[in-house]
Image (cartoon, helix red, strand yellow):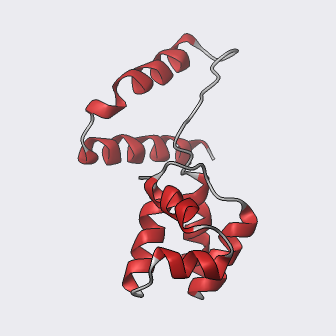
Amino acid sequence: MTPFGEKLRALRNERGLSQKAMAEAIGVSAAYLSALEHGRRGAPTWTLIQKIIGYFNVIWDDAEELARLAEASHPRVRIDTSGLSPAATELANLLAENIEKLDEAELRRITASIRAALGRRV
């Protein structure tokens, strides 16, 4: 499941909505919506994100969070390190080869560390 899929499912469940009803309302198939929630489909289009935001009638912060989560929800990531340092290539390969071995707490810690490092450079 992707971060976007997890949030989408939570919003739908909080409101007691079925995938079928939501899918019909936003103009997609229930199968597509299920695949989106389970991370078997890539990030949704901007247009679909806007339909989902409208469907749930969410306000600014929640709408921005949905858009941010969609951007961070590509289930098949490809990292091109050509032209970068050997350290960048090593990091990309280390993650690719071992990410499934990390538990949720370790993943959150590593993510927070990378976000902090990026924040220091802005």
The residue closer to the viewer here, 105 or 114, is: 105
Of residues 83 and 67, the one nearer the viewer is: 67
**Residue 82, percent from left and from top:** 68, 15
Q: Where is residue 42 in the image (x, y as percent from the top left)?
A: 60, 49
Tell me: residue 64, above or below residue 95: below
Residue in the picture at 44% in, 25% down:
96
| Count of marks overlaid on the render | 0
Asked whether the viewer can see residue 58, the reply is no
* Residue 75 percent coordinates (x, y): 51, 43
Q: In this view, does 11 lie above or below 112?
A: below
Q: Answer above or below: position of 58 versus 27.
A: below
- Which residue is at 49% across, 40% downward? 117
> Residue 112, how many percent across, how many down?
40, 48
The residue positioned 54% from the left and 37% from the top of the image is 76
Camera sees residue 100: yes
Camera-side residue of 74 and 85: 74
Task: Place residue 68 in its image quadrant.
Answer: bottom right
Q: Residue 8 or 29: which is nearer the viewer?
A: 29
Residue 98 occupies quadrant: top left
Find the residue positioned furthest to the top: 86
Residue at figure coordinates x 59%, y 58% from the top left: 70
